[in-house]
Amino acid sequence: MELWQQQARESLTCTQTLADRFGLDSDALDRVVARYPMRITPYQLEMIRQADDPLGRQVIPDPLELADDSPLTDPLNEEQLSPVPNLVHRYPHRVLLLVAGSCFSYCRFCTRKRKVGCAQMKITMGEILKGIDYIAGHPEVNEVILSGGDPLTLSDTLLDDILARLSRIPHLQVVRVGSRAPVVLPQRITAGLCALLQRYQPLYFLTHFNHPRELTKETVEACQRLVASGVMVVNQTVLLRGVNDDADTLYRLFHSLFRLQIRPYYLHQMYLTCGTGHFRTRLEEGIAIMAQLRGPLSGLAVPHYIVDLPGGHGKVPVTPDYVQALGDHARLQAADGTLVDYPQR
Ligand SMILES: *Cc1c(COP(=O)(O)O)cnc(C)c1O
Ligand code: SF4
């Protein structure tokens, strides 16, 4: 067994141990975990100083999860957009293929928390093969996004098998792999894995840092191994109340990623998923943060702030209201906040 597999196996799932460590009520934790599973990698546990710090909030079960009565368990309508199980085909040329049913750590804000880590999300090789057949039968699909759960919970052998099958589909040109492993189990990013991914370029590795404190010696080195292997690393962040909902924190996060050659790609407005309401900020707050980032942050480090619309209508970018139309003139808001007239012709 590889070291990372050993560590993944030692992840914390016992609420009593967690309660003792951080002075929490284990009965309250149990009630949450009965509905939404908990798992925290040993590495991530070491990084948490207090239950309510930006790292603790992301993975420690909170009774507020049960107090949220949003009716939407699948706000993105992924189940309806699945022509075959565990494949989501919403956009014409790219599909999402869910290849793993579990993650190294369970994020409390996960949009798939209805099923990630639960018995109903056991994904079989047979289902993955059906997904691959679907892609092979749809010549318009040129990109596949491997997601889950976390695809890197699979062994290198299985991952290699899946990528090899995909690479034999002539019309499929680009692979994207979404994984939080660099953040929560950096030991997973082995030299062997990097060599494997390198063989399937063009391959975009989409990771998920939410807070500058997640950039540690270990996680930075994991990302450097990926970057050095020639894999393009991009990052998505979820805007989370009480974790990263201020411009200074996000400035530090995005600038640090930029320095590491990791392009900040998306800043997601929190989804309407049941059990995540306590993390949601108002849209106006996200817009104000983006307006504050635009000047100080290198343009290469500014992500798109997006809302994934409920009902499966897709992602839309949300931008500060920079333009006021005034007939023959438009008035644009400059980075310093002043309004500047701009002739239309
Ligand atoms: C987000 C998403 C994608 C990828 O969209 P990009 O804008 O290319 O990152 C593809 N399919 C589904 C179903 C998605 O939710
Ligand atoms: S790693 Fe991704 S899929 Fe897994 S729990 Fe976190 S947000 Fe959800």
Image (spheres, rainbow, N blue to C red):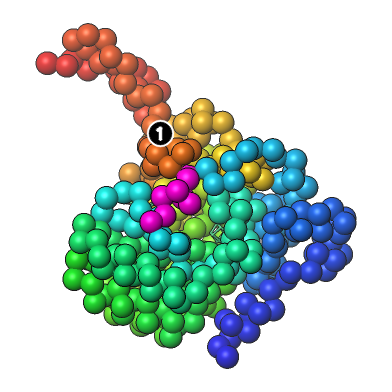
Quarter of the figure with the C terminus: top left
Q: Residue at 69%, 61% (x, y): give it.
A: 37
Along the viewing direction, whichever of 77 and 109 lies nearer the viewer: 77
The number of callouts visible is: 1
Q: Mark 1 points at which residue?
A: 318
Span of residues in magenta = 76-83
Quarter of the figure with the N terminus: bottom right
Extreme top residue here?
327
Residue 232: tell me if it is visible: no
Please identify the dominant SS of the magenta region: loop
Q: Residue at 59%, 41% (x, y): give it.
A: 72
Q: Could you say where residue 238 lies in the image, as x and y percent from the top left? A: 52, 48
Q: Residue at 28%, 14% (x, y): give it.
A: 325
Residue 176 lies, with reference to residue 68, above or below; the image says below
In this rendering, would 78 be left or right of 72? left
Extreme left residue here?
345
Residue 43 lies, with reference to residue 82, above or below; the image says below
Q: Could you say where residue 64 lies in the image, as x and y percent from the top left? A: 74, 44
Along the viewing direction, whichever of 135 and 221 lies nearer the viewer: 135
Q: Could you say where residue 32 lies in the image, as x and y percent from the top left? A: 76, 54
- Quarter of the image holding residue 239? top right
